[in-house]
Image (spheres, coloured by chain):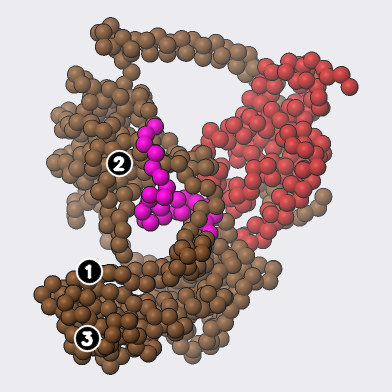
Chain colours: A brown, B red
Amino acid sequence: MKDTPVTEALERLVAPFDGEQGAWSDVLARASRGGRRRKLVTVTVLGFVVVAGLAVMVPFGLAGRIVGLFRDEGKPVSVASLSRADREALIYSMCRRVDLVTHRGRPPEKRCLDGEPTIEEIANNGTRLYWKVSFPSGMDCLASGSVRGYREYGGGRSHIGMIGCGQRLLPTPKRPITVDAVMHFKTGDRRPRVFRVSGLAGEGVATVGLVEKDGDAFKTRVAGRTYVFERPPDREWTAIAAFDDSGDQVYRERLPLGPWPVRTRRRVVPPRRRRLPPLPKQAPLQHAEAPAATVDVYGSGLVAVRFTSTASRGYRLVRPVTSDPRVPISCASVAYGAGQWEELGSGAYGDFGLEMRTFVTMARFSHGAARPPFDVCSVRGTYGQRWNDARGMHDTVEFSFTPLGRRFFAEKAAARDLALFLRTPEMRAIRKAMAREVPTASEISARFPARVVALGRRSQTAPSPAIGVWTDRKQLIIVSRQAEDGRRMFATLRAGRFGPHNLAGLITLLY
Amino acid sequence: MEASEGASLAEIELVYRRRLAEFRRVAAAIVGSREAGRDAVQEGFAIAVRKRKTFRGEGPLEAWLWRVVVNTARGQLRKRTETPTAYTAATSNGTPEDDSDAYVRAALALMPERQRLVLFLRYYADLDYRTIADALDIAPGTVGVTLSTARERLRGLLQEIPQ
């Protein structure tokens, strides 16, 4: 059985144990200890029964009780009810293998091939909620956030602000409260300030207190099995403590809020240029060409981009303007259905040069990221994009491997054109004034270069690359343009807010 | 063949003394640390000694001992790591020599556990397919296929990774 690379790797991984003496007596000792351990377990169980019995007797004033027990069951939360952002955070970002699925007549969606987690709301105090998330792999996480939710860019709300996985997620008799602390620094201040401290509280914990150096506690009541200190007074808190309903302290934990080292301003050193990753021996999985550039994608996620000339437009635009040599290279799988796009991407930096290589995804190491084969890859310059600038609305260098990829780039460029148009100072001023007046299409187009034209009908489209504008002069403005593949892309503004549009999955509309 | 009732202490000790190095190497590969590997073998044999009466003699004693030690090591790994993906971080003790093998560990961690175990038992202990099948409680015919798939997969991953 000769398989040199595998054998060498395994040989290197664990060196032989040759020549080591065994300890048979230790085996026998452990074997006999195991018997004693069973007896100890029996004694412990008996002890537990006694303690549990005493706990039951508490109401009768017969003994103490166990504080900190926490039943981690609650109201099931349907995965289907999660917002897009929560689904991204709780499912796809934790999923090893994600793909895109399209069903006839429905928008495409991401799917986690590892399986979906089970989610239960285990605590809720009316403002903060706690979800226990159990993944098919056996991993348990605790997600917490706002009941009201956080507004997401591009619409929708999410609820999850924090996720923790692993140990010490739930209260136990040994540690009857959990502690999530959010701190902030003021400029020039070495002492962190508490912004928020929150957590779960086990049975028997009535109040939780932030404790000062002299022992004074600033307390809050436990509600819905949770506690929260929202922007507590700015004092030198040294610990957090849990108290039972008679006010006795049942637990105390130090808060690491001592002075932090003074941060000195350091010169920012640009990252060093890295050695190009070697090309695999296998042929590339995918190859595509763009004007003056080619790309090869390998099964491992390695992407090699080559410019054919330093004089090419792509090379000149991608060249970084600072001493930082990194440029973003990204690849994606895309899907289209029911008029909507979905993108599953992955990207990494590559060092600028005639040839650039980077692993956009480390083979199977990345969670929630696309893996080869892709539909598209692109290299973007480190410049920002403005509406109607000379660099155009496409990514600097675009490679399409599939017809779907070509359509994606065509429609994305048109979508970006509209999104950036809506963010121009002129359009923002018009949007803000929509409550008072909505100008005519001609009045709007007159404020822009000739590429913006007034339309006579709302369903009309101006020929590419013009942007068409139509208004009802009351409350509605429709902007549209034809993508290079012929599709009409549009967005609406109704009473100053974004209304229906077909740019989802291509670009995020920002106010 | 009539099934025997239990294994004797002397028989277990004999296997321990003869094959200790291989047991430790396989256990170390599973748990990701030499010290933890030694401990897993000691604990595994202690369990075998305690449960020796349950050995029914349906296969070789050595295969049964391999099963006990492998299961003990797997149990210890589960205690050390919370998820299979945490294998890389949990099994590296942070020393520079470990870092050089981090990618190999990561690659192994990404393989199904059965493939990983078959590889370890074959490469580190040079067990035949029958013993591997008994040790892992799988069909003997599955061992060859699993081993071949595991080799192929690991080789592929190693070629993909910049060394």
Query: What residue sits 33% from the left and 43% below the top?
Result: A144
Residues rendered magenta in the picture: A73-99
Left or right placement of residue A328 versus residue B62 in this view: left
Q: How far apart are the alpha carbons under marks 1 and 2?
A: 30 Å
Left or right placement of residue A206 versus residue B129 in this view: left
Residue type for callout 3: Ala
Where does label 3 land, which residue? A441
Query: What residue sits 14% from the left and 75% below the top?
Result: A433
Q: What chain does mark 3 sit on?
A: A
Judging from the image, what secondary structure is the residue with disc 3 in?
helix
Residue B34, percent from left and from top: 62, 37
Q: What chain does mark 1 sit on?
A: A
Judging from the image, what secondary structure is the residue with disc 2 in?
strand
Where does label 1 land, which residue? A497
Residue type for callout 2: Leu
Residue type for callout 1: Arg
Left or right placement of residue B96 versus residue A222 in this view: right
In front of the other: A454 or A86: A454
Query: What residue sits 27% from the left and 57% below the top?
Result: A151
Vertical placement of residue A50 versus A261, above or below: above
Between disc 3 and disc 1, whose residue precedes?
3
Residue A484, percent from left and from top: 44, 84
Taking the view exactly as shown, the residue that stands out farthest to the right is B1
Q: Residues within 10 Å of mark 2 (few under 14, many from 20)?
A: many
Q: How far apart are the alpha carbons under marks 3 and 1?
A: 18 Å
Where does label 2 land, which residue? A129
Residue B108, percent from left and from top: 63, 48
